Amino acid sequence: MPSATLVTPGGVGTASVVGAWSDRPTISYTPLTGRRFAQSLLSPIPPAAIFSLIAAGYPADAVLLATVRAINGVWNDTIEGGERRPGDPAFFALVEALRRVQLSRAFSIEVKQEGGKESVIAIFAARQDPELVRDVAFIGSTLGLETRNGEVDLAFGAVQRRPDELAVLSRSMLEIMIDIAATIDVPPEHVSSGKTFANPPDGARRQGRVRIFSGREPPAESFTQVRYGDYWYWIPATDFASKRALTYLLLFFSLAETGVVPSAPVLTIPVQ
């Protein structure tokens, strides 16, 4: 503590300056609770937000496989009561066609809001390849869409009410995480003992989903890994599709977030 003597016309005084320095900063976390927790975890992701991601260039197939249960009555794989309900074959052909159209460089989409309604607008280049024309025709016939000059109204739901409506039954974050959990290679003894359900074999897994392996010993190399009970669970470092899908979860959490961040942190952890 440094000090100094100060001489004034009226006398002598002593002033001190005290300082402190710490090499242990803190990180503060604010867990979600109450209404905000329910909104961010249980509320379906808005359809407009999903198509805004696709308009921004994120892969249509990866985004739709993770966030959508059904589009105009065409169903994705779903988990109901711990069991997987297979999706319509047309759904997977649909998202593949949407991805090819997205990559065609002759197509773009816009999402707009007008008069309380949200719309998706498809914009095509003047010249179109035959493959693009076929994919666009397949998408329109599969979804039963009749556009207004390339424009359709977005709505939340499984079945469309009008030919120019795109009804999207989107998932909540809880549903997305349950879907990911259904792709874990669970230990056989955990299934036989009743701890969990048996997940589908490799052949029933859809591309674009997270693949999580398990074993009693940790892997030599992994993208991420965690020990739970007497088993290790991991995503291989070479599994690009799973790494991408897991990374997209951060985006989906942001899309589902609708509350206001509290001003006061609840938990503070010192960093050594």
Image (cartoon, rainbow, N blue to C red):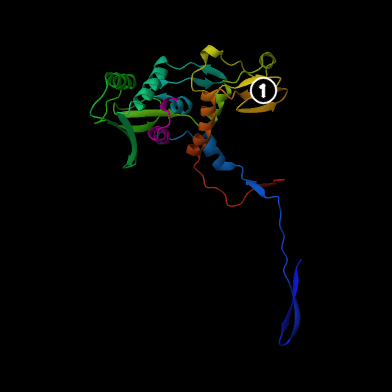
In the picture shown, does residue 113 fall above or below 264? Answer: above
User: SS at mark 1?
Assistant: loop
Compare residues 22 and 187 and report the one nearer the observer.
22
The amino acid type of the residue labelled 1 equals Ala
User: Could you tell me what secondary structure mostly forms the magenta stretch?
Assistant: helix
Q: Residue at (53%, 38%) from the top-left corner? A: 40
What range is drawn magenta here?
49-61
Tag count in the figure? 1
Residue placed under numbered mark 1 in the picture: 220
Location of residue 213 (image quadrant): top right
Estimate how packed mark 1 is, as few (under 14), some (14 to 19) or many (20 or more) residues with alpha carbons within 10 Å: few
Residue 7 place in picture, x, y as percent:
73, 82
Quadrant of residue 112 within the rendered picture: top left
Q: Is residue 56 magenta?
A: yes
Locate residue 169 relative to residue 118 in the image: left or right: right
Q: Which residue does the image show at 42% across and 33% down from the upper left?
A: 50
Instruction: Based on the picture, tell me whether residue 122 belongs to the magenta stretch.
Output: no
Rendering coords of residue 65 (x, y %): 46, 24
Name the quadrant of the N terminus. Answer: bottom right
- Rendered view: 99 above or below 109: above
**Residue 236 at what x, y percent from top left?**
59, 23
Q: Nearer the viewer, residue 160 or 12?
A: 12
Where the C terminus falls, by quadrant? top right
Q: Is residue 258 above or below residue 139?
A: below
